[in-house]
Amino acid sequence: MADQVTAGETERADGDPRAAGSDEPEGPQRAEISNYDIVQHHFRQAAERLDLPDDVAEVLSSSYREVRVQVPIKLADGRTQVFTGYRVQHNGARGPYKGGVRFHQDVDLDEVRALAALMTWKTAIAEVPFGGAKGGVNCPATDLQVADKQRIARSFIDKIEKVIGPGRDIPAPDVNTDAQTMAWMMDEYGKLHGHTPACVTGKPIALEGSYGREAATGRGVVYLYREAAPALGLKPSDTRVVVQGFGNVGSWAARIIAGLGARIVGVSDANGAIRRDEGIDPDALLRHLAEGGLLPEFEPAEAIDPGELLEIECDVFIPAALGGMIHERNADRLNCRMMIEGANSPTTPKADEILEEKGVYVVPDVMANAGGVVVSYFEWVQNLQHFRWDEREVNDKLGGIMRRAYRSVAQRAQDSDLSLRSAAYELGIERVVEASRTRGYIA
Ligand code: GLU
């Protein structure tokens, strides 16, 4: 299995919906409900079912620390511009805080707070010994020159260096940040603290990054497809897949699942959407984008309205763009049997209900996209040991963790008659509560 789910490495951002400089898909509008409300909704429901005492629920529904910083940089044209950066550490009961840093014009405290909480549950569900954190800088990342992006990365680290570190909080890539961004961050942290590769993960291979890290989130999505497929009687050779967002997660998931024999029948990015019932070759699409082509111009696929992407008849729909893309007003249009959430919080609670009524099997973000943080854990371990594993070892270990997470969540869902999402939240919350109690944080 490891071989089949293995593909080569390239450099692009983790969770980035804009491969080749594209923006998020514009077709289906995003939901009005914020990421924060989505995550809080799932937490509150699970807390109620678990009968968590109010004081415990209060500790777990708020952040441990929220840092808001000024990120001033001198632009290439000589002007100074000030951006706002955030690092939210949600819960550290199970280990050092862990989570990505995104550069995006929509970043705000609420979003970062929600994504930090999501990391707490994600690391607990995957059983990697980390807490949850997230960071972000509000900036127009896709319009910035590389030199300005570097200045932002360094300036941000200068402002948060006191609250991060290998045993404290370990940033990683997320939307519009990548291995190069992590290299700048590691270098900046090193100027202040001495060479410390374990201070960030998702680094380039040349700078003590881990083999397999870049593809890890997409590969994790495919491992979960393989776990879930038998329940729906699906075989890769007759699985049709639609991928919304063709950044790091979407493009790797597409390449790896196509490598198993599945057919990619629809893809979108910010510039539009395409479909082809006979199948789209994701490698050829990547080459087309790398050469400066736009996604809707990719031949021999047919350009369609991004809204129509949801209506393509398929077996597996993979949302891999930004949060809130599947909502009350468009969930009914989905024409899939299974949805595996590569993005963080792509589905609103109302959309969840609609999908449940339609009988769509939803594999939720907190489990489905954990592959990135799992291999970040491996990278951190390798850095602390000053020892490197080969890619096969990384992928095999990733597969083991993803399978275990899926099986324990699916078992819980079956035993308690819950959706996978509800079962996953329950498991994650229980593990964090246990760690908090054992430490003596809560009674
Ligand atoms: N940004 C990724 C996520 O949302 C990875 C985080 C990490 O590797 O720490 O899961």
Image (spheres, rainbow, N blue to C red):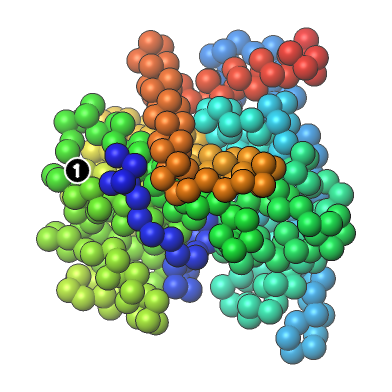
| Quadrant occupied by the N terminus | top left
Identity of the residue drawn at 39% across and 72% down: 271
Q: Which residue is mark 1?
A: 236
Residue at the extreme front: 387
Instruction: Identify the residue at horizontal 26%, vertical 66% (top origin).
Output: 274
Q: Where residue 354 appears, x then y in whole percent?
A: 34, 35
Q: Between 169 and 273, which is closer to the camera in this rendering? A: 169
- Asked if one can make out residue 26 in the rendered structure from this viewpoint, the answer is no
Residue pictured at 50% horizontal, 35% vertical: 366
Q: Position of residue 194 (x, y in %)?
A: 84, 57
**What crowding class fits label 1: few (fewer than 14 Cα within 10 Å), some (14-19), or many (20 or more)?**
some
On the rendered image, what quadrant is the C terminus found in?
top right
From this view, report whether residue 47 is shown above or below residue 78.
Answer: above
Q: From the viewer's perspective, tell me whether residue 261 is left or right of residue 323.
A: left
Which residue is pictured at 37% across the width and 75% down the height? 289
Across and down, in percent, residue 269 comes to 39, 65
Q: Quadrant of residue 435?
A: top right
- Rendered location of residue 147, percent (x, y): 68, 79
Decide if ligand 1 comes within 8 Å of the CB at mark 1: no
Residue type, label 1? Pro
Task: State which quadrant residue 39 falls in.
Answer: top right
367 relative to 190 in the view: left or right: left
